[in-house]
Amino acid sequence: MRRILTILALVVLCYGASHADTSTVMVKMVDSVYISLSSIINKGLPVLYVQTVDQEEPTCEYVSAPPGSMGRTIRNATKVPGRLTIYQYIDGMDSVIYDSGDYEEDVSGMTIRIRGNTSAYADKKPYKIKLQKKKDLLMRGNEGKFKDKDWLLIKDHYLFVTAGYIVSELLNMPWTPGHRFVNVILNDEYRGVYLLCESVKRNPDCRINVDKTTGYIFECDPYWWNEDVYVTSLKSPAYNFTFKYPDSDDILPEQLDYMQGVVTDYENSLNNTNYPDKIDVVSFAAWCLAHDLMGTQDSGGANRYYYKYDNTDTSRIVMPVLWDFDMVERTTSQWSRCHTSHFDMLFNNSNRQFVDEFVAQWRRVKPTFYDDFVEAMNAFTSSAEGQALVASSALEYQRWNFDLEVLDCAGDRKYWYQTRVEWIDPMINALNPIGDVNIDGKVEIADCTWLIDWLLDSDGPVMHAYDVNGNNVVSITDVTLLIDLLLSGH
């Protein structure tokens, strides 16, 4: 539904759209093969048409990790100034729905640079676009809420990202980045089909909301060695923590000292029972459950972003977003490898609140998860955007010799989640069986005693395990059901 509304908003709310003569503008595909800009627009996806000053191409330096670290990435990516025009096929005509104007710092235009780590090594580069004036490039019809300067162009050839964001929404992650497919032309050369999406940054209206002066967005980052500013990890030798907000150029020494203390306290709490005082257990459980459902193999590549709203003691660390889906659908009969990074300590902590929340979230979504996923994927493939993506597959094949196979990929994603649910359900139930009120891994008469004591003196926190019948109310009926389970030999 969200994607359908996006399409409608693009068509109906892009007031001021002007018609354009695009039939005579030629775009290079490969070698000496050219096609008209109009023929690309007619495929149905929005077309991002970027012209840089003097036709300059973005460049970067490729670097590998020093001894003792991991990964390949880039540095010194050039920010090339230029102009962005977005075309859309509306009512049978090619229309301009956005024009940044020529580049003038802080006034108009944009810059484009290569982004990513290992993904930047591919011939088809991922890019970051930075506008000089804020705009909602997804055209969602609420400019005041969604406008921003920073936008990303990433690849989603197999619909891994699309599927991942569906999972994000089904698990009620704090933030799911807005996104839609587009065709990209850079300096009159077709660069392929991309997913245009929001970047991880502070934007209190629509992205991540942290206090402007005392808030932080940070990452447990395997590429920390490529950054000038970071704080060190005690629990993950190959990782340290880098910053998305404030910008590393703006962080003061006292802020760095403060965040070193925050990270140290956080990591130490994972082995202690006081971790709920440090982290937002709900978001941590949802993030881990999502990666278990996706079967993520790379614990490092599955970017672990965090935020802390402000510098008060009551501000807990939150995991707000799922990011990077390159290594999903790899762990077929095992937990995701994310279990080996911080989460192993939470699963083995004597304070079972995290496990309780992890199990409860799965039990809450399990009855409809697969059907909801299939419905969302079907809605996408049958939408105007999905059909336009199918139509653009020929362009992608002509440029990169890669067939998007949209419907086949959607079918593969549905099959993965069907089989994954079958594997993961008994595994999660084994963590905390229904009726295991005291969360000790067993269902026995002690659970009845525990629940009755809590009902008689309910000063403690409500744990999901207390709600035996799953109706979101803890009452004597839960005791009755628990007794029935025990009498039936559960």
Image (cartoon, grey):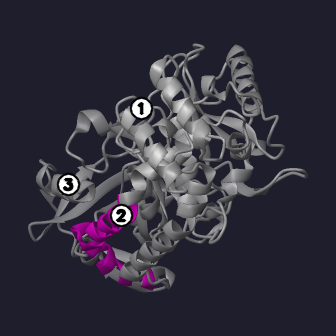
In the rendering, at what x and y percent does residue 182 appear?
35, 64
In the rendering, at what x and y percent does residue 320 appear?
50, 39
Which residue is disc 3 drawn over? 5
Which residue is disc 1 drawn over? 203
Pick the front one: 64 or 239: 239
Q: Is residue 469 left or right of residue 256?
A: left
In the rendered structure, which disc, 2 or 3, sits on the residue that comes first in sequence?
3
The mark found on residue 181 in the picture is 2
* Callout 3: SS: helix
Instruction: Tell me, yes or no, whether the highlighted magenta stretch contains residue 248.
Output: no
Q: Residues within 10 Å of mark 3 (few under 14, many from 20)?
A: few
The mark found on residue 220 in the picture is none
Quadrant containing the C terminus in the rendered view: bottom right
* Callout 2: SS: strand
Please tell me whether residue 401 is drawn above or below residue 176 in the rendered image. below
In the rendered structure, which disc, 3 or 1, sits on the residue that comes first in sequence?
3
Q: Is residue 67 left or right of residue 144?
A: right
Quadrant containing the N terminus in the rendered view: bottom left
User: Mark 3 and mark 2 in contact (Cβ < 8 Å)?
Assistant: no
Q: Hey, what amino acid is under mark 3?
A: Leu
